[in-house]
Amino acid sequence: MIDIVLDLGGVLLNHNMPECIRQFKLILGDNYPRLGLTVSGEATDTDLMRQYEAGKISTDHFIAQIIAWGKPGTTENDVRKAWLAMHDCIPAQRLEQVRRLRKLGYKLYLLSNNNEMHWQSTTQRYGLPDYFDKVFLSQTIHSCKPDKLIYETLIAETGVKPGNTVFVDDVEENRKTGESLGWKTFATLEALMNAIDS
């Protein structure tokens, strides 16, 4: 039986960078460049956004820094809302595809390589742990993305075999890391489902 590893952010959640950027610009004003978030959602290795995504600083620190840089009256809720706008929901079709994979008997593993804000919000709304054999949160097992440690930890804890593992991630560099481990990769959940059905 095939083991399937899915990335949370780029595969299941909608990607809405324009809205995320709009909200952060409202909060930060002239200080927005200090966040380091580009139009594509990429960030440099030294900015606040990259440090947070890589698990190098806590959620509390990230929020406190944005509030300190933000316009007067900025609240924790404002920061959380802006961050979560980046990935605002899981389309019903993708949830149904995950349920279908589960019904077909595949072992499913989820990588949340963003941070606990997305994970907590997503868990509360969709109950994702019920569909996955194990969830791996990046802030607890690796320091920066893409780092083989997250995949090596997954392999060690699940026993997935190279030729038996499918990896779905929208980030090409991460897929290359998966391919170096002998995994078959797909950029989207839809592409994986098409391959299963063909």
Image: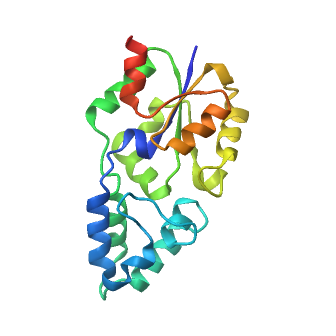
Relative placement, left or right, of 44 versus 10 is right
* Image quadrant in which you'd find residue 175: top right
Q: Please state the horizontal and vertical placement of residue 146, each as a whole percent of the image.
A: 60, 49
Quadrant occupied by the C terminus:
top left
Q: Which residue is painted at 59% across and 53% down in the image?
A: 145
Is residue 97 positioned above or below 55 on the image? Answer: above
Q: Please state the horizontal and vertical placement of residue 35, each as a whole percent of the image.
A: 43, 74
Quadrant occupied by the N terminus:
top right
Q: Is residue 125 visible?
A: yes
Q: Please state the horizontal and vertical placement of residue 68, each as a whole percent of the image.
A: 43, 85
Q: Is residue 74 visible?
A: no
Closest to the observer: 34 or 52? 34
Q: Which residue is painted at 57% across and 59% down in the image?
A: 54
Instruction: Identify the colour scheme used.
Output: rainbow
Relative placement, left or right, of 124 versus 4 is left
Q: Please state the horizontal and vertical placement of residue 112, each as a whole percent of the image.
A: 51, 46
Relative placement, left or right, of 41 versus 140 is left
Relative placement, left or right, of 24 versus 101 is left
Q: Which residue is painted at 53% across and 49% down in the image?
A: 113
In this view, the residue farthest toward the bottom is 72
